[in-house]
Amino acid sequence: MWEPDGKIIDSNAIGSLAPHEVLFEFEFEYLSFVAIDPNGDLLLVHSLSASGGISRYLVSPIDQKILCDLKAGRLDIHSALRQPRCWIADLVEQASPTTPWRIQSLYRIDFDSVPSRCLPAPGVMLSPEFDPLFRVRLIGSGVVPGTTSAADIRMAAQAAESGLRGLARIALDVKKQAGQVPRDVRRYSDLPCQYSRAGGFEIALGRPRDMVPGLDDEIFGEMGRLLNQGLDALRADQDDGAPIEGLSQHQAAQLFEAIQALTPPMRGGVERVEIGGSLTDGLAGSRILTRDDRPRSSKRVKAARKSPVIDPPFRVTGVAEGADQGFDFFILRQLAPAQIPGLGPVAEIKFTFEDHLFDKVALAWNSQDRVAVVGERVDSSFHALDLQLADDPAP
């Protein structure tokens, strides 16, 4: 075992370390537990290693809030253990039910002196059920304590939400084609923040609070598979226009747009982005995105969307009687004029729209007021460019 770089102190200084509450055990070995010091304060005790009948634990003083956050999955083990005062305790097993061990030696240490290989990795939770679904960590010269900017923090949150939204659209589209009723896209992208950590800023997102096994698990599993498939294709030595197995050109473009949203900007202090969490860890572990991945993904998006037939924009008024906020489209009916240039007389038009129009579409859908839509036809699809309240009366 590694030798602690610290001062040996009286083994009774923090009490007997008798387990007060066992937090995690494996094969009857206490890996994480709570003890009480002689002053009645809480100690978090976590197993680092064992050899020759001696078990080495890291001991950190904590308060009730840290303990509650740890048990609720709002705080990872690494962050809970990282305290200004820490000890290394070497314990020897005893044949007593009330005193399962004795402290052979106790060291007062600095947390940063503990080798990283001995510590739980950042982001690892007390129980696997609390592991983050998706996490984004910014890495670079400009992402350090006291330097990380609000723009960088905003970028991490937006990258996570935009990337997940693109993946969810494809995964849900597959479910819809299979005849299954999908949920809202935002259910799988606008996720609750499980924790955030400064110093190489990281944000971790958890599962929906009303997570239901079954469809939700399938969707998140498909999103993770798509992300890894896209990253593998992005870095493969192949033509930019090479097809992605199982995806249409439109879906391939959406996939690479989602990846592009997760890449670091070409300038600034963020040089790399690490993505991880249970969405990807079970397939390929954490992945690192670099600045080189941004132009690569941009080329793949352009190749997948090459040579679309785009007609001139047109204006039409109507009522958004059918809308799907999850799939980002709405259906405009009661059209005026009913004769659409290049299309002829139609009863309704299905428009897709970007996020910046979401509030306007939601208002139109809920109010049933007539709206004017400026749209364009791209190949056989229609895309809304803008939406406003209409001045003309109903036809």
Image (cartoon, rainbow, N blue to C red):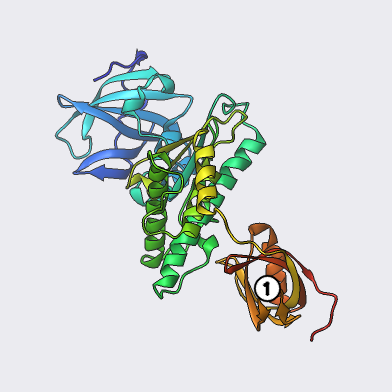
Who's the residue at 80% across and 71% down the image? 389
Which of these two is toward me, 229 or 199?
A: 229
x and y percentages locating residue 135 in the rendered image: 47, 44
Does residue 125 appear in this view? no
Q: Is residue 166 left or right of residue 124?
A: right
Who's the residue at 72% across and 82% down the image? 338
Who's the residue at 41% across and 59% down the image? 247
Q: How many marks?
A: 1
Taking the view exactly as shown, the residue that stands out farthest to the right is: 391
Q: Is residue 23 left or right of residue 335?
A: left
Does residue 181 appear in this view? yes
Helix, strand or loop at label 1? It is: loop
Which of these two is toward me, 96 or 106?
A: 106
* Depicted 346 relative to depicted 173: above or below: below
Badge 1 crowding class, 10 Å Cα cut-off, few under 14, some 14 to 19, many 20 or more, is few
x and y percentages locating residue 206 in the rendered image: 47, 52
Which of these two is toward me, 370 or 296?
A: 296
- What residue would you read off at disc 1? 342
Query: What amino acid type is highlighted by mark number 1?
Result: Gly
x and y percentages locating residue 73 in the rendered image: 43, 48
The quarter of the picture where the C terminus appears is bottom right
Taking the view exactly as shown, the residue that stands out farthest to the bottom is: 395
x and y percentages locating residue 181 in the rendered image: 45, 74
The quarter of the picture where the N terminus appears is top left
* Depicted 212 relative to depicted 243: above or below: below
